[in-house]
Amino acid sequence: MQFALRTQSPPAAYIANKEWCAARLPACPLHPQGGCSFARHGSYPRVTPQGVRIARWYCPEGHRTFSLLPDFLAARLPGLLSDIESVLLEAKSARSLEAAADTLRGFAVTLPSALRWLRRRIRAIEAGLQAFDPLSPELPISVLACLPARRSDLCGLRQALPTSFLQRLPAPPGLPVAPWSRWSPTRQGA
């Protein structure tokens, strides 16, 4: 399960400062009252951007790992939220999806593969933004005031929203709880 790691650092600074080493998850999400063997479980690398690592913890009693995903990374898609945002802008400005896919992926990938890659990102972004609209009245005014002016500012949206709200939004802007998970942000405990 992923939680947001609130960082104002850009990816290069996050990597240079090895910020995943200082990341903290204060208590087990499955056992917030304690009593389990919750412990740091190292970190794992992300393919892109190169050098990024994600801090991870493990609860042996709950048989579950937890990780802190920096605000600039996409959930369940490789790369940065800003890169995915750029893909959306390119798709909207291109004369067709085929032209956008060709521009974004180049000649190393077949056009059908590039179209699948592009459509997967467009669907994910649109699902996250559409899911945000009906939930936004539930946000406190203080949070609404911090939201980015552009709805497509995925990194700004991730940084402004509380974790409990992010877990109700689909990825990549949100950090949804896996459908097979017994834990939910509204039900604290196994």
Image (cartoon, rainbow, N blue to C red):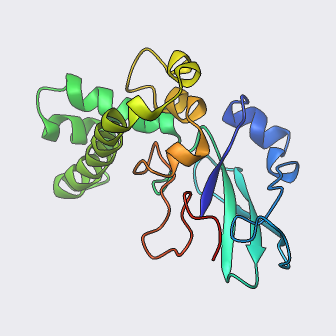
Asked if residue 111 lies left or right of residue 174, the reply is left
Please tell me whether residue 39 is drawn above or below residue 100 in the rendered image: below
Please tell me whether residue 162 is drawn above or below residue 142 in the rendered image: below
Q: Quadrant of the C terminus?
A: bottom right
* Count of marks overlaid on the render: 0
Please tell me whether residue 92 is drawn above or below residue 114 in the rendered image: above
Q: Position of residue 82 (x, y in %)?
A: 49, 32
Please tell me whether residue 59 is drawn above or below residue 120 in the rendered image: below
Asked if residue 24 lies left or right of residue 29, the reply is right
Q: Position of residue 63 (x, y in %)?
A: 67, 83
Question: Which quadrant of the view contains residue 85?
Answer: top left
Question: Residue drawn at (71%, 28%), measured in percent from left and top?
Answer: 8
Q: Is residue 131 visible?
A: yes
Asked if residue 133 lies left or right of residue 182, the reply is left
Q: Position of residue 189 (x, y in %)?
A: 65, 71
Between 11 and 173, the one lying in front of the other is 173
Question: Residue drawn at (59%, 57%), measured in percent from left and top?
Answer: 47
Q: Is residue 106 visible?
A: no
Asked if residue 64 lies left or right of residue 176, the reply is right
Between 9 and 138, the one lying in front of the other is 138
Question: Which quadrant of the view contains residue 152?
Answer: top left
Question: Residue drawn at (57%, 44%), measured in percent from left and top?
Answer: 73
Between 107 and 148, the one lying in front of the other is 148
Q: Quadrant of the N terminus?
A: bottom right
Question: Residue drawn at (73%, 30%), measured in percent from left and top?
Answer: 9
Q: Position of residue 183 (x, y in %)?
A: 57, 70
Between 100 and 53, the one lying in front of the other is 53
Residue pushed farthest left? 96
